[in-house]
Amino acid sequence: MMQSKRFHTKSSVRTNRSRTQGKNFAQKRTIPETSRQSLKIIPLGGLDGIGKNMYVLEQENDILILDMGLQMPGVNQPGIDYLIPNTQYLKNNMSKIKGVVLTSPHPDHIGAVPYLLHLFPNLHIYATEALFAILESRHDFYSQGIKYKKHIIKPYNSIRIGSFKVNAFPTPFNVIGAIGLCVYTMQGKVFYLSSYKLDSETPGKSELLDYIKDLAGSDAFALLTGSVASESQGFAPTESSIANYIDSIIAKNTGTIYISTFPSMISRMQQIVNAVENHNKHLFIEGKSLLNTFNTCRKKGLINIKSGTIIGPSGLSEVPREKLVVLIAGSHGDDIPHLMRLANGEHTVFSIEAGDIVVYPAALIPGNARSVARVNDNFAKLGAFVEYYQELDTRYGAYARYEDTLAVLKAVRPKYYIPVTGSHHLLRSNGDIAIKGGYPDRNVVVGMNGKVILFDYKQRRVTPEKVPASDIIVDGLGVGDLTNVVIHDRQSMAEEGILHIIALVDLQSRTMLNDIVLESKGFVDNESSMKLFDEIKDQARLIIATLIRESDEVNLDYVKSEVRENIARLLLTKTERRPMILPIIINI
């Protein structure tokens, strides 16, 4: 076990504000040290991959929740829309819940909110105005009868949530509305900075470090920081460098420019707007989720745009190709068909022409690297230039790297360091940053979802106690259509059954071979459902035959997704059930 000295910094004169904020509840209570009440930190998600962030702080009879995120399924999880945290422990302790604080507008921090609000009515939600704007633009809670208590957080203000006192402060990041937290607990101050980067070219870097150093004082107890980019060296790229890259792309005049981003990236959309206006071009927005967020943020003054920059469908014919920029949606799967249809030459409004430019981060493409390569190939065959830039991605361009993490650790100087937000090897990598920086490894706590981390007068850490933390699967007809969403775990999926749709095709002759074969397990009885099976075959045959016949370049992954989506709608209408649909299309 590695033993080494902790960070040492010169003492500084603390302000009146810091002396007030530096006290914790344990200091205010004149009780013996050995009687200090315990603090539990329970990760319900966030420690087994990128996404599904949800952490519970529990003391006395109060529970404070940090974030409610979702996670995208892996390539070995077909038929699944999203994964969200298991909240059985919270349901068992409903009376203790005092509220949830949301710290980032990205889906990995707020994506589970519309689903979990069904389970926790009238939940108190604390977030910045910008974060609420993104959340509410994408989900119509009111029409669904979902009620919650809305509390807008103002930066640098303190709020009381049950027995917890919370200081919220803005963090430099690639989205507007991201915050870090300092939570005053019975054991001391717990800092939570999951989404941030130290942008060296903005005042935010020094402001953040100075503020958290002053706030932490000499008695910071624990620091929870994100691990997404912990394996990357140096500092995260600056937002100004990304803005310059976007401007250089939009400055080109070879053809129409298609650029894709996530609806939560308000600051990225503003950078695109600025570049469009700098070069006297026009912007068209394609994609419901992106358009809703853009319009909501524009009304709230979070996005500034000149009159005449945006054009609608009726104005497309009046704009020269080289003067048009299309902001095309693609957010963790829900608007991917826009980009995929564009690549396959099947978009109803736009078609790629020689000289056009397509810019997107790889995370917009579902599946694996082969899917990205096929999409790139399709665009290239149509004559487009593909600009694949990792810094546009939420992972490579957004999150704290080695030097960012080290600087925050030195500023806070907590007793315990707890890596969060990432797969286990990323958590270990993040923990190694603290150990290499001088922390003894016994003070670096690398946890697991569901494992209770307990701090009391014995200063125990990870305990044998476990709470339910298995993945909950969201399998629905699309984010935003909450009336048709079905949430179920793996057991209920087994009860719904599986439907295989098997087709043989000859891509050289663009024809289907033989008839569609269906295999049902646990869904419906084959003999008693011949009429339904005939409808499934007819619809699947029509989709497959049309796509392989009319596409310039056939992408079988895209064909499978279209079959899965359309057959799912048919089965929900006919049977009110959602089996796992597995299309198998074999090229002979």
Image (cartoon, helix red, strand yellow):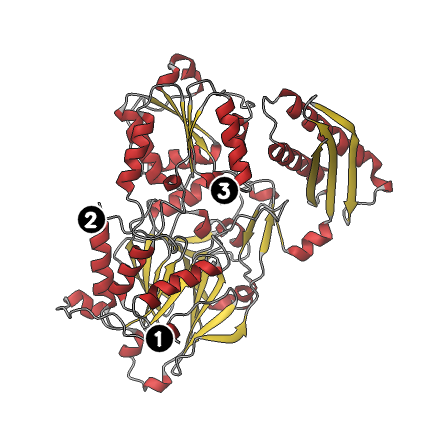
Taking the image as shown, residue 563 lies to the left or right of residue 303, namely right
**Image spot of residue 225 (x, y percent):** 36, 60
Image point (78%, 44%), residue name: 520
Mark 2, secondary structure of its residue? loop
Label 3, on which residue?
A: 332
Q: With 103 as the anchor, is 220 left or right in this view?
A: left
Badge 2 crowding class, 10 Å Cα cut-off, few under 14, some 14 to 19, many 20 or more, is few
SS at badge 1: loop
- Do the numbered discs 1 and 2 sit on residues whose CB atoms are within 8 Å? no
Q: Earlier in the sequence, mark 1 or mark 3?
A: 1
Name above or below for residue 374 compared with residue 53.
above
225 to 569, vertically: above or below: below
- Taking depth in this image into account, of 147 and 86 the one nearest to the observer is 86
Q: Secondary structure at mark 3?
A: loop
Amino acid, disc 2: Pro
- Quadrant of res 269: top left
> How far apart are the two marked residues, 1 and 3, measured between alpha carbons?
38 Å
Mark 2, residue position:
203
Mark 1 lies on residue: 186
On residue 110, which mark appears?
Answer: none
* Viewer can see residue 418: yes
Q: Quadrant of the C terminus?
A: top right
Observer-nearest residue: 271 or 588? 588
Residue in the picture at 49% in, 45% down: 141
Q: Position of residue 82 (x, y in %)?
A: 56, 48
341 over 24 or under it: above or below: above
Q: Residue furthest right?
A: 527
